[in-house]
Amino acid sequence: MKPRMNHCRSVLVSISACLLLLGCEAKLDRPDFDPQWSSSKALEQCDANSDGQIDPSEAAAAPGLLMAFDQWDTNGDKLISGDEFGERIAKYKASAGSVASAGFTVTYKKKPLPGAEVILDPEPFMGEGFAPAKGTTDRRGYVSLNRPDMGDGGYPGVYLGLYRVRISKQEGGKELLAEKYNTASELGFDSGGQTREARTSPRFDLE
């Protein structure tokens, strides 16, 4: 019986070692959130009149920020200061989780748009560690985007942050959608407001 017991112990030790190894491999790296750097770069990108603040018209230079303007304008003065911007990035940095869901429903002329390519481009001021994520809508017009290079690739979603959204639908090499949805996209997404448990996905209703 003793040899059998030793064999069982060896198997258990091997399984435990594998689980520990898998746990290490599945560890999810966090972006290097830098509130001061991001704030400076955001002002550089958007603050056209150099007054140290970003108004809604200036935020159009970063559709992700424009989409989330009211949430980032914490004092409600219709301006986002460098401090307000930095505070939001600091919240990302302090967050227990660095990944948010990124599922979207796309419609065109009030009907689901299947076969459309959806790309999330991180705004430049988000910093290193961010990269585009893309996917293709299904017959319901739905797409769930993942960053395959995060951790072991098993994490659905994208890093917390602001993104420009590009949506393209081509037939015969011809783009069917207006430039404001792709090459000159005005669409934005703030993944910081999303959770994996969200029951509904953001919608992009194109015309």
Image: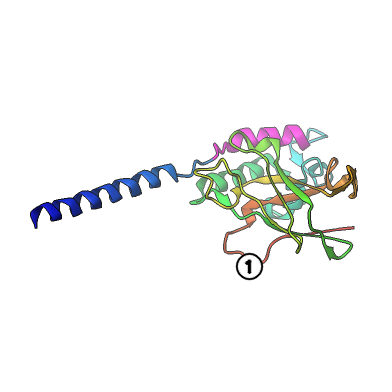
Q: Main secondary structure of the magenta part?
A: helix
Whether 52 is drawn above or below 109: the answer is above
Whether 83 is drawn above or below 107: the answer is above
Camera-side residue of 94 and 198: 198
Camera-side residue of 66 and 154: 154
In this view, the residue farthest toward the left is 2
Identity of the residue drawn at 36% across and 43% down: 21
Camera-side residue of 114 and 52: 114
Decide if residue 98 is on the left or right side of residue 76. left
Does residue 106 show up? yes
Secondary structure at badge 1 equals loop
The answer to which image quadrant residue 174 occupies is top right
Hey, what amino acid is under mark 1? Answer: Arg
Does residue 65 show up? no
Q: Where residue 64 sits in the image (x, y, percent)?
A: 73, 47
Whether 40 is drawn above or below 8: the answer is above
Is residue 34 in the magenta section?
yes
Q: Residues within 10 Å of mark 1 (few under 14, many from 20)?
A: few
Camera-side residue of 2 and 135: 2
Identity of the residue drawn at 77% across and 37% down: 46
Identity of the residue drawn at 65% across and 54% down: 102
Q: Pointer 1: what residue?
A: 199
Q: Where residue 121 sits in the image (x, y, percent)?
A: 71, 41
Q: Where residue 158 sits in the image (x, y, percent)?
A: 61, 48
Magenta-drawn segment: 31-46
Is residue 98 in the magenta section?
no
